[in-house]
Image: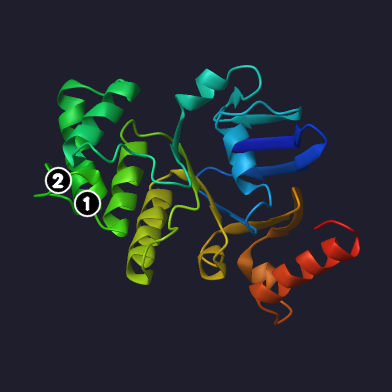
Amino acid sequence: MTPAIHVEHLTRRFGAFVAVDDVSMDVQTGEVFGFLGSNGAGKSTTIRMLCGLLRPTSGRAVVGGVDVGRDPEGVKRRIGYMSQRFSLYEPLTVDQNITFYAGLYGVEGDRLKARRDFVLTMAGLHGREHQRARTLSGGWRQRLALGCALLHEPPILFLDEPTGGVDPVSRRDFWRLIRTLASQGTTVLVTTHHLEEAAQCDRLAIIHAGQLAVLGTPAALTADGRSLEDTFIDVVTRARSEGRP
């Protein structure tokens, strides 16, 4: 089966600094694939390359059958992307944000009506259509951002630390949405530094100092009775002993 995301020796340098160092992996269709790592590990830089927002220094990535280096605009049409920070326009209302993103994705007419109702239902925002985004709670804001990323029904979804700053109940509800999307065939790549979120992924990559250190299912990574936290600490400790911060 052709993977939804195929990555070969992906590298990104900023001058002498190597932010992403020779990463290779595949993500299968309908899989929830997690990137676990501390701040500055290279997670967001990798996602930005896979979304066509940042050109790789070397290596190759194919997302949804499109080569990222050759056709970054083609990749953008096949994905949904939710950035680490709140990615919508806070002075605009809920409805105005939906309409704006629908215009960007070319969603209009009857399809827009159906997708607007989907977003409002999924985010629990019926009755708040005229409320400005900046006045929403963290959980509602994140669900609205997710809904706008899904307006054009992309087969692949990139979520960069999507639950930052939200309460535990909202985080739980958000992950229920992720699992529902995956069960319907959407491929989800999500970055996190929360171990409890990482444990909910189908497969998990631990990235540190720009390198992919460990890859496997959460069950496989804890098969010896050790926790994900133990595995993560081992990765960081080993890297530091090798002179990588």
Image location (x, y in percent) of residue 138: 32, 57
Which residue is tagged 1? Answer: 135
State whether residue 228 is above or below residue 59: below
Residue placed most toward the observer, 188 or 99: 99
The N terminus, quarter of image: top right
Disc 1 vs disc 2: Cβ atoms closer than 8 Å? Answer: yes
* Circle 1 crowding by C-alpha within 10 Å: few under 14, some 14–19, many from 20: few
Q: Residue furthest right?
A: 242
* Residue at point 34%, 24% (across, down): 105
Image location (x, y in percent) of residue 238: 85, 66
Do we see residue 206 in this rendering?
yes
Residue placed most toward the observer, 24 or 132: 132
* Residue at point 62%, 25% (across, down): 68
Apparent side of residue 137 relative to residue 221 in the rendered image (left or right):
left
Three-letter code, disc 2: Gln
State whether residue 21 is above or below residue 106: below
Give the quarter of the image for residue 112: top left
Give me the disc on residue 87.
Answer: none
Q: Count the labels in the image.
A: 2
Which residue is tagged 2? Answer: 131
* Residue at point 15%, 31% (across, down): 113
Three-letter code, disc 1: Thr
Do we see residue 150 in this rendering?
no
Apparent side of residue 211 relative to residue 80 in the rendered image (left or right):
right
Give the SS element for disc 1: helix
Give the SS element for disc 2: loop
The C terminus, quarter of image: bottom right
Give the quarter of the image for residue 9: top right
Image location (x, y in percent) of residue 5: 60, 37
* Residue at point 38%, 70% (across, down): 168
State whether residue 92 is above or below residue 183: above
